[in-house]
Amino acid sequence: MNTTYIVKRKNIIRIGVLVACMLFTIVYGILIFNACKQREQAWSRQAKAVFLEAVGNELKKLDKMEIYGFHTITSLFQQKTLETDIPDSVVFALQDGTHVYHLPLHRRNNAYFKDGDKNIYLSLILEKYPFPFDSLHYAWDKQLALSDIKGKTGVCSRITDLSRKVSTFASGALEEFAPSDSLVSTYLGYRLEMELSGYISCSWWSLLPGGMVITVVLLWCMYIFFWLFYGRLNQLVSKRTVVVEKIVEKALLPAKSRNKTRHIKARVYRLEHDVFFDAEQRLFCDGNGVIEKLSPAMSVLLEHFLKASDHTLTKYEIYQIMGKDLEEYSLDSFYKMIERFRKKLKQFSSVTLHSDGNGAYRLILPLDPTDMN
């Protein structure tokens, strides 16, 4: 297993995890979108029902005021055996003559009372008592909150008088609503002269299903964590695999193929019984995995010692290997470098570096039972 294979494998794993996260996000995105649409439709149906219920409650209040104030027995909400249909048009005799008011189909279909007689009585009540649309807005908002429907609401009242002039009253900032935010309209009166409209606007984040969103966020947090720390995890895991494979390969080699350099495979050397040096990846390894990664300079120097005859290099050869100039690189710096090299070898193996006193250095490898054959 070489470095190119390891890099390719790392890239494949990263790309695979990224693709998996993207596919998971796309699937969950579709599910979240559908869940938002379903919640929006459910909220719209429920908010419409609550609005009409609130209109009915306000009309009941006006009905009671009329009954108690004028001691009438007529009620908007009394049960009737027969109901009269809403006519296509109504006729009023005014001071300036007779006027015909046509009632559009959409108004008749959305009238609160489908009974023409009740609408006559309602017009009489509305002439005495203005409809409390502010109270309607408050009651609607309160009921929506109890139903856990989160949205900004507004109520608009449009009244068409006998001269066909329209007066508009609003509760809430209607200028913040788009025409598409109009949820429901209902009409009151004999001429269906009063239009009550409810507006609601739900933010997209209020429609999001919390659990599904948290799942996607956690997934991407895990992916970011994986991306940031995969290199370190891969170094601890994949390098262990490399060492195990190379130990197995060593055992399969015939005894005569082992030379004094203890060369196992391309740029892999056995320093002692269970310690190996992978020059390509600059790793000290043992049977348990990676021990230490050497610096490029130390890795190059150690490989040259292992490949050299009798594992011996002169001071001049070391200078050349390290790319140093004899005139510019001081002896003090040279000896410090040699000392650091000795300490690194001693830290992770029984290999020592011996000086013959004449400017040459020899790498002493511990005696292995296999070398005695």
Image (spheres, grey):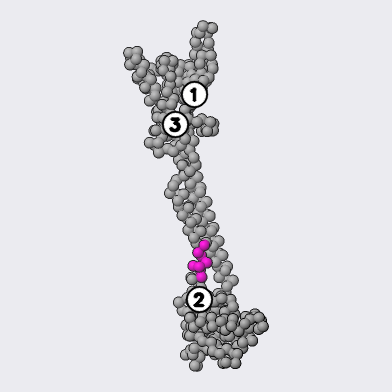
Front-lying residue, 66 or 342: 342
Q: How packed is label 1: few (under 14 Cα within 10 Å), some, or many (20 or more)?
A: few
Q: Report which residue position mark 1 lands on.
A: 169
Give the overall secondary structure of the magenta segment. helix
Q: Along the polypeptide, which appears first: circle 3 or circle 1?
A: 3
Where 143 sits versus 241, above or below? Answer: above
Residue in view at x 63 percent, y 86 percent: 317
Query: Which marked residue is nearer to the observer: mark 3 or mark 1?
Result: 1
Magenta stretch contains residue 58: no
Residue in view at x 52 percent, y 62 percent: 228
Q: Are marks 3 and 2 in contact (CB under 8 Å)?
A: no
Residues at marks 3 and 1, CA–CA distance in whole angstroms: 20 Å
Q: Report which residue position mark 3 lands on.
A: 48
Q: Secondary structure at mark 1?
A: strand
Q: Along the polypeptide, which appears first: circle 3 or circle 2?
A: 3
Q: Report which residue position mark 2 lands on.
A: 292
Amino acid bearing label 1:
Phe
Residue in view at x 48 percent, y 79 percent: 286
Front-lying residue, 332 or 272: 332
Front-lying residue, 130 or 210: 130
Q: Indicate the position of residue 260 as horizontal and vertical percent values.
A: 55, 89
Q: Indicate the position of residue 117 as horizontal and vertical percent values.
A: 41, 15
Range of magenta residues: 228-235
Residues at marks 2 and 1, CA–CA distance in whole angstroms: 80 Å
Amino acid bearing label 2:
Glu
Q: Along the polypeptide, which appears first: circle 2 or circle 1?
A: 1
Query: Which marked residue is nearer to the observer: mark 3 or mark 2?
Result: 2
Q: Secondary structure at mark 2?
A: strand
Q: Indicate the position of residue 110 as horizontal and vertical percent values.
A: 47, 24
